[in-house]
Image (cartoon, grey):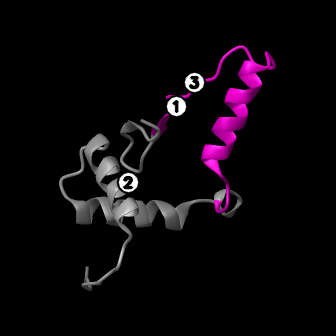
Amino acid sequence: MHTQKLLLNIPDTLVEQIDHYKDIANEPSRSKTIIDLLKYALTLPPCFKDFDWQKAEAEADEAIKKGKMKSFDTKALLADLSGKRVDLFS
């Protein structure tokens, strides 16, 4: 497989999120982490493209407070591409 080197200007806050994901997914390097995240983003169904996960979690928490739901796992575990289960909200 041929590869290309890219130079990206990424905001510090995004780098922090990438590093957090790298740590919880036990990825060997930042570049491997970015490649995996890009692959995942390219395979994400279009219906999730603009989905606001943080807003959805906040709405669910509000529904719990109002008694509309009995429980909601705010530490929801999601599977990454390699099948590892990682907590993206910690």
Question: Contact, CB < 8 Å: mark 1 with mark 3?
Answer: yes
Magenta segment includes 36: no
Provide the residue designation for mark 2.
17
Identified by mark 3, the residue type is Asp
Identified by mark 2, the residue type is Gln
Residue at 34%, 49% in the rendered image: 21
Identified by mark 1, the residue type is Ala
Q: Which one is closest to the eye, mark 3 or mark 2? A: 2
Residue 71 location (% of width, % of height): 66, 17
In which quadrant of the rendered image does the N terminus lie?
A: bottom left
Q: Quadrant of residue 74?
A: top right
Figure check: 63 above or below 2: above
Question: Contact, CB < 8 Å: mark 3 with mark 2?
Answer: no
Closer to the chain start, of discs 3 and 2, is: 2
Residue at 60%, 45% in the rendered image: 54
Q: Secondary structure at mark 1?
A: loop
Provide the residue designation for mark 1.
76
Q: Nearer the viewer, residue 28 or 14?
A: 14
Residue 79 location (% of width, % of height): 45, 41
Crowd tier of the residue under label 3, counting other residues whose Cα lies within 10 Å: few below 14, some 14–19, many 20 or above: few
Closer to the chain start, of discs 2 and 1, is: 2
Q: Which mark is residue 73?
A: 3
Q: Nearer the viewer, residue 46 or 89?
A: 89
Q: Quadrant of residue 7?
A: bottom left
Crowd tier of the residue under label 1, counting other residues whose Cα lies within 10 Å: few below 14, some 14–19, many 20 or above: few
Q: Is residue 78 left or right of residue 25?
A: right
Q: Is residue 39 left or right of residue 74?
A: left
Residue 60 location (% of width, % of height): 70, 31
Bounds of the magenta segment: 49-78
Q: CA distance from mark 1 to mark 3?
A: 5 Å
Q: Secondary structure at mark 3?
A: loop
Q: CA distance from mark 3 to mark 2?
A: 21 Å
